[in-house]
C-alpha cells in the first residue's frame, strides 16, 4: 500500500513542479463559466426563461457542473493507453506492482490537486457573483458530496475502460474527442439534462455532473436512496467491465514496441 | 509558392499517418465535429424557450456556431498542432531545423503539422452554417463572396495571433499554457459579441480579436458593416509586427536542449 501512497504523493509534487501551468489550468475553468454567465444574463434580461430555471439556479448549476467537469477524471490518464500501445506495460507486469492500482493512486493525487486549485479559483469567483449563487444547506452539501464521491469512481472507471480499449483497438485516442464531448453533453456540463428531456436525462452519465450539481442545489428530493443505489450500480458495472477488459486484454497483449 | 507546396505535401503525408488506424481516424473526425454538434443542440434548446439573445435570432446564432466551427476547424487543421508545439520546439532546441531550410521560418514552424481529422470534420460546420443562412433569409448582394473572404481573413488573423504568442516562447521557453488560454478565449467565438460587457468587447474585438473571427463575417452577411474596418486592419498590423519582432525574438533563442523524436 505504501508504494501506491508514494506514487500519489509524487503525482502531487509533479503537479506543483510546473506551477505556472497549474495556474493556467485552473483559470481555464473561469473562461467558460464567464461565457455562460454573460450568455444567460443576456438571455434572461430579454424576459425569457428556460425550463424551471431562474438565473440564479442556472448560475449555481454551472458553478457546480463545471467544477465537477474540470475535476473528475473522465479520461483517467492517457499514459495508460500509451503504455499498452507502446509495450511499456511490460515494465509494470514484471514488477510486484499493479498497473491499475498505480493509476488509481496517481489519479487520486492529481484529482486532489485539481480540486484544490479549482476551488481556490471558484470560491473568489462565487463571492464576486454571490448575488446569483444559491448556497447549499448542510444536508444538501453532504448529499452532493456523496454523489460527487461515487461520481468520481464512475468517471475514473469509465476513463479506465476507454484506455484499456488500447488492448483491442491499437490506438483508442481517436475515440477521446467524441467521448469527451459526449460526456460533457450527456453528463450535463454543457446544458442541464432536464432541459434535454427523456431519454438523455436517464443515462448513467448523468451521475457525473448533473445529479451531483442538482444535489448541491438541494433539488433532489424524495428518491435520494434510489438514485444512490442506481449510481453505485453503474459504478459496479463499470468496475466489472474494467476487470473484464483487463483480464481479456492481457491475453491479447503482445508487448511489441519498447 | 514553395510554402504552399510544402503545406500540401505535409497534408498528404499527415493523411497517410493519421489514417493508419482507420477506426480511430474516423472516430477522431466525429470527435472534432462534436464541438459544433453539441453547441447546435445547446442553442437549439435555448431558442426553444426564447426568441433571441442580445438581438441575435436563432438563424444568426446558428450561423455563428457554424462560422466559429469553420474558422477554428480550418485553423486547427492547418496550424493548430504547429502553434501549440512552438514552445516545445524551442525547449528541445529544434528550431534550427526550420531556420536552415529555404522557407520563411516562422510560417514553416507554424504550418509544419497539419491535422487531417480537423479538415475532414469541416463539412459539419458548413452544414450548420448553411442551415443558419437558410433561417435568416438575408441575401445582401455580394454577401457570400464577402463572407468567404472574411473567413479567410479570420484564419489569417488567428494564425498571426498564434505566431505572435509563439514568439514569447523564444524568451520564456515553456509557454503552452498561453495557447490553452487562447483556445479558451476562442470558444467565445460561438457567442454573439453583444452578450459581453463593454470591457470584454474591447478586449476580444480589438486586442485579442477572437470574438471578431466569427461575429464580423456573420454581421457582414447580415448587412452590418460596422466592424469591418478594424477587422481588416488586423492582418496588416500583425504582418508588420511579426516582420519586426521575429528576427528580434530569434536573438533570444539559445539552441539548447536535445533534439529527440516524440510521439506526435
Image (spheres, rainbow, N blue to C red):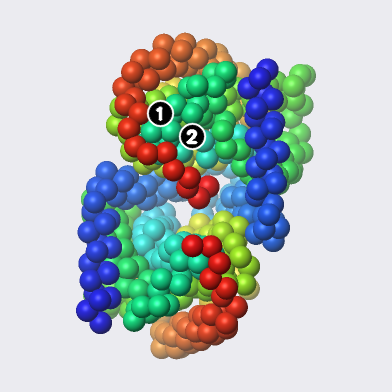
Q: Is mark 1 on a helix, strand or loop?
A: helix
Residue A77 shown left or right of residue B75 in the figure: left
Q: Quadrant of residue A221?
A: bottom left
Could you classify mark 2 by the number of other residues whose Cα lies within 10 Å: few (under 14), some (14-19), or many (20 or more)?
many
Left or right: where A92 falls relative to A22: right
Spot occupied by residue B238 in the image (x, y as percentages of width and height): 47, 17
Q: Mark 2 lies on which chain?
A: B
Q: Which residue is tagged 1?
A: B165
In this view, the residue in front, B220 or A120, is A120
Check disc 2 and report its element: helix, strand or loop: helix
Q: In this view, does B32 lie above or below B63?
A: below
Is the residue under label 2 in contact with that under label 1 (CB below 8 Å)? yes
Which percent across, then down, holds residue B62? 65, 42
Residue B242 seen from this side = yes
**In the visual, does B60 lie left or right of A102?**
right
Which of the two discs, 1 and 2, labels the residue nearer the N terminus? 2
Amino acid at each position: 500500500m505504501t508504494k501506491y501512497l508514494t506514487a500519489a504523493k509524487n503525482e502531487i509534487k509533479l503537479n506543483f513542479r510546473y506551477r505556472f501551468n497549474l495556474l493556467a489550468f485552473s483559470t481555464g475553468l473561469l473562461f467558460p463559466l464567464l461565457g455562460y454567465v454573460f450568455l444567460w444574463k443576456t438571455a434572461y434580461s430579454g424576459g425569457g426563461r428556460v425550463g424551471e430555471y431562474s438565473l440564479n439556479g442556472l448560475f449555481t448549476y454551472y458553478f457546480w457542473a463545471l467544477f465537477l467537469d474540470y475535476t473528475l477524471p473522465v479520461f483517467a490518464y492517457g499514459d495508460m493507453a500509451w503504455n499498452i500501445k507502446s509495450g511499456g506495460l511490460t515494465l509494470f507486469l514484471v514488477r510486484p506492482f499493479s498497473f491499475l492500482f498505480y493509476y488509481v493512486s496517481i489519479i487520486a493525487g492529481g484529482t486532489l490537486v485539481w480540486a484544490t486549485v479549482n476551488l481556490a479559483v471558484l470560491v473568489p469567483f462565487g463571492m464576486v457573483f454571490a448575488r446569483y449563487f444559491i448556497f447549499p444547506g448542510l444536508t444538501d452539501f453532504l448529499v452532493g458530496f456523496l454523489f460527487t464521491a461515487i461520481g468520481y469512481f464512475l468517471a475514473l472507471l469509465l476513463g479506465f475502460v476507454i484506455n484499456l480499449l488500447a488492448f483491442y483497438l491499437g490506438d483508442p485516442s481517436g475515440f477521446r474527442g467524441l467521448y469527451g464531448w459526449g460526456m460533457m453533453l450527456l453528463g450535463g456540463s454543457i446544458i442541464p439534462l432536464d432541459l434535454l428531456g427523456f431519454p438523455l436525462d436517464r443515462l448513467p452519465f448523468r451521475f457525473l455532473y448533473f445529479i451531483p450539481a442538482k444535489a448541491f442545489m438541494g433539488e433532489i428530493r424524495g428518491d435520494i436512496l434510489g438514485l444512490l443505489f442506481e449510481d453505485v450500480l453503474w459504478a459496479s458495472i463499470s468496475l466489472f467491465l474494467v476487470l473484464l477488459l483487463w483480464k481479456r486484454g492481457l491475453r491479447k497483449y503482445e508487448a511489441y514496441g519498447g | 509558392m514553395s510554402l504552399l507546396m510544402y503545406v500540401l505535401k505535409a497534408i498528404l503525408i499527415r493523411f497517410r499517418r493519421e489514417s493508419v488506424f482507420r477506426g480511430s481516424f474516423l472516430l477522431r473526425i466525429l470527435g472534432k465535429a462534436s464541438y459544433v454538434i453539441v453547441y447546435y443542440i445547446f442553442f437549439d434548446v435555448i431558442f426553444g424557450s426564447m426568441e433571441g439573445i442580445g438581438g441575435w435570432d436563432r438563424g444568426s446564432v446558428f450561423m455563428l456556431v457554424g462560422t466559429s466551427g469553420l474558422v477554428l476547424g480550418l485553423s486547427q487543421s492547418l496550424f493548430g498542432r504547429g502553434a501549440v508545439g512552438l514552445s516545445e520546439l524551442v525547449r528541445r532546441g529544434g528550431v534550427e531545423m526550420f531556420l536552415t531550410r529555404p522557407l520563411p521560418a516562422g510560417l514553416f514552424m507554424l504550418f509544419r503539422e497539419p491535422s487531417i481529422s480537423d479538415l475532414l470534420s469541416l463539412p459539419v460546420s458548413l452544414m450548420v452554417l448553411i442551415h443558419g443562412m437558410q433561417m435568416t433569409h438575408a441575401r445582401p448582394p455580394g454577401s457570400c463572396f464577402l463572407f468567404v473572404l472574411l473567413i479567410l481573413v479570420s484564419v489569417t488573423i488567428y494564425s498571426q495571433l498564434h505566431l505572435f504568442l509563439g514568439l514569447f516562447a523564444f524568451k520564456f521557453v515553456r509557454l503552452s499554457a498561453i495557447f490553452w488560454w487562447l483556445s479558451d478565449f476562442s470558444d467565445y467565438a460561438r457567442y454573439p459579441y453583444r452578450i459581453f460587457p463593454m470591457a470584454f468587447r474591447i478586449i476580444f474585438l480589438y486586442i485579442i480579436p477572437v470574438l471578431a473571427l466569427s461575429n464580423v463575417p456573420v454581421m457582414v452577411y447580415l448587412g452590418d458593416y460596422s466592424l469591418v474596418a478594424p477587422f481588416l486592419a488586423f492582418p496588416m498590423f500583425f504582418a508588420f509586427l511579426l516582420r519586426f519582432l521575429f528576427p528580434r525574438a530569434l536573438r533570444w533563442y539559445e539552441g539548447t536542449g536535445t533534439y529527440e523524436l516524440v510521439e506526435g
